[in-house]
Image: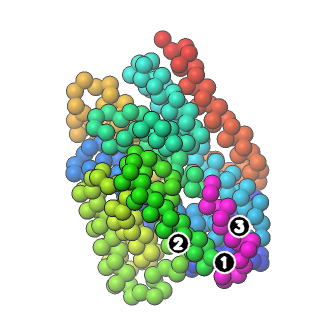
Amino acid sequence: MSTTPTAAEQNVIHDANGETGYRRDVQGLRAIAVVLVILAHAKIGFFGGGFIGVDVFFVISGFVITGLLLRQPSHEFARNLGIFYARRIRRIMPAATVVLIATVVATYYWLGAYSGVQLDTDVRWASLFSANFHFISLGTNYFTAGLPPSLILHYWSLAVEEQFYFFWPLVVFTIALIVRGRHHRWAVSGALVVIIAASAWWSYHETLINSVTAYYSPFTRFWELAVGALVATIPLAPRVIPAWFRALIGWAAIIVIGWCSVKMTDLGVPGTIMWWPVGATALLIYTGGNDVAYSPSLHLATKPFTWIGDRSYSLYLWHYGWLMIPAAYATTPMSASSRAEQIVGALVCSMLSYDLIENPLRRSTFLNRHPWLSLPILLVCIGSAWLTAWLCQTYWI
């Protein structure tokens, strides 16, 4: 069963540009996001602000997912929701679960039962994509100096995305039932403006009061995904802005992202300061999608960027354990060459994960025809993570 409607179907929702194509430059932008995060976690170079790569991911996710939602048949509410959630489960859960299991086993083996037992509870929350709420309850500071309090701390951002993915399709498909035709896009845009205003204000307010809660909370982060979603609902720049000016805006956005990755600190994060990388990412997507020789989108669409972008999800999952477990195991500070080797190890694991787990499940014709099978896949994934944590905690000596 395909989620893409045929040309003969009526009442089909398109994105703002009538496009159903693949934005290679956006996929290339994923590469920049994941590389920034890895450099920040590896403490290589001057990319202390590379944590903004997560915020770049949020904007991209909002854009891509909303474009997908807007292309679904407007009259099939239950079917749209079922197929969307089924595909998200197959896309996200198996790879995330494999990394959770590998991290638990590696932690018990190299760091011992004490560290493993501490990790077990984190893994259970992460398997339910609620790690962000767990870290809020523990008062975990993402920017605490030294080793991280959890070896799966990076799962907080996956939790925020999945919480948005649960909420936002309900809004889009409900609006589709109420507002038909060309006015649907404007209704969705209006809903996004409300979400952005409310969430951005709460982000500013909560950052002043409780920076830990503000950092992990979906209510302080939804506006970032909603900004990307808003870009998907409006006509892209190529139709209204000259090519040279689009390229100029795009390069300015690249410079802002680069500046933030070097200069941004944890002070006032997320708050209002996140408007810099979020706004720059939105502008880069808005002005992209063209093949002008001097445009940054043309360079982002090249094979090296898109190759990493395709594997960015698996690379994001694997990199943290590869960097943090050796750092906790070692008795001396990690050298740059050691960090490079660990990044290569994470890349190899991400390649295997992408080819052996992500793609086979995502492209399975059988699973596409039987979306209900995603529910047992979900249960098996959750059960496997919990069982591994329990077995290691109970029997590891």
Q: Earlier in the sequence, mark 1 or mark 3?
A: 3
> On the image, numbered disc 2 is attached to which residue?
193
Q: Earlier in the sequence, mark 3 or mark 2?
A: 3
> On the image, numbered disc 1 is attached to which residue?
184
Mark 3 belongs to which amino acid? Thr
Quadrant of residue 272 within the rendered picture: bottom left
Q: Indicate whether residue 53 is drawn in magenta.
A: no
Foreground mark, 2 or 1, reads 2
SS for callout 2: helix
Q: Can the viewer see residue 314?
A: no
Mark 1 belongs to which amino acid? His
- At 74% from the left and 51% from the top, the residue drawn is 371
Binning the other alpha carbons within 10 Å of mark 2 as few (below 14), some (14 to 19) or many (20 upward) gives some
SS for callout 1: helix
Q: Residue furthest top?
A: 397
Pick whichever, 250 or 134, lies toward us: 134
- Counting every numbered tag in the picture gives 3
Q: CA distance from mark 1 to mark 3?
A: 10 Å
- At 32% from the left and 28% from the top, the residue drawn is 328
Q: Can the viewer see residue 255?
A: yes
Q: CA distance from mark 3 to mark 2?
A: 17 Å
Pick whichever, 34 or 260, lies toward us: 260
Mark 2 belongs to which amino acid? Val
Q: CA distance from mark 2 to mark 1?
A: 14 Å
Which percent across, then down, holds residue 178?
73, 74
Q: Left or right? Give the position of 183 relative to 203.
A: right
- At 44% from the left and 63% from the top, the residue drawn is 201
Region rendered in magenta? 166-185
